[in-house]
Image: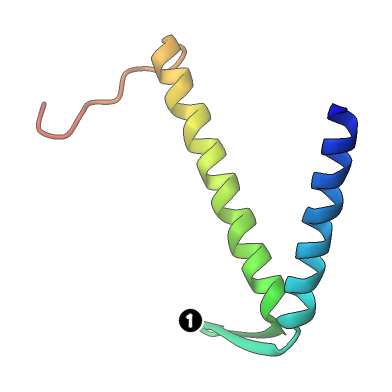
Amino acid sequence: MIRNKMLAAVITGFSLFGVFVFQNMAAVDLRFLFWKVSLSASLLVLAVFSGGVLAGWVLSKLTHREKEGRLPHLPREGTM
């Protein structure tokens, strides 16, 4: 029962991702400082999303380690 629901969720997710990629295949120009890159909009969205997930994961690990006492306590704003 759970396996069927998981399979349906995975198939639905991949189908929605495929529709998203198909609808956003147009090339966009990304300019940052002196760089200029042309790539599909779906790749840009995927890269930004992945970067955000990675940044959130790293920050959550750092704050978790601080709470466990494995990192030195960082001074809070206004406590100096």
Tell me the quadrant of the picture where the N terminus can be found: top right
Amino acid type of the residue tagged 1 in the rendering: Leu
Give the residue at the far top of this rendering. 69
Task: Pinpoint residue 38: horizontal percent, then vertical percent.
Answer: 69, 87
Residue 38 sits above or below residue 51 on the image: below
Q: Determine whether, in the image, residue 75 is placed left or right of residue 29.
A: left
> Which image quadrant for residue 20?
bottom right
Nearest to the observer: residue 10 or residue 54: 10
Q: Quick one: SS at disc 1?
A: loop
Residue at x 52% of width, y 28% of height: 61
> Which image quadrant for residue 37?
bottom right
Residue at x 53% of width, y 46% of height: 55
Q: Determine whether, in the image, residue 33 is placed left or right of residue 77.
A: right
Task: Pinpoint residue 5: horizontal percent, then vertical percent.
Answer: 83, 37
Task: Pinpoint residue 35: horizontal percent, then vertical percent.
Answer: 58, 83
Residue at x 47% of width, y 12% of height: 70
Q: How is the image coloured?
A: rainbow
Tell me the quadrant of the picture where the C terminus can be found: top left
Give the residue at the far front of this rendering. 1
Residue 58 sits above or below residue 64 on the image: below
Q: Determine whether, in the image, residue 17 is placed left or right of residue 64.
A: right
Number of on-image labels: 1
Nearest to the observer: residue 1 or residue 79: 1
Which residue position is annotated with label 1?
33
Nearest to the observer: residue 74 or residue 22: 22
Residue at x 64% of width, y 55% of height: 50
Question: Counting other residues with Cα less than 10 Å from the Cα at mark 1, is it few (<14), some (14-19), or many (20 or more)?
Answer: few
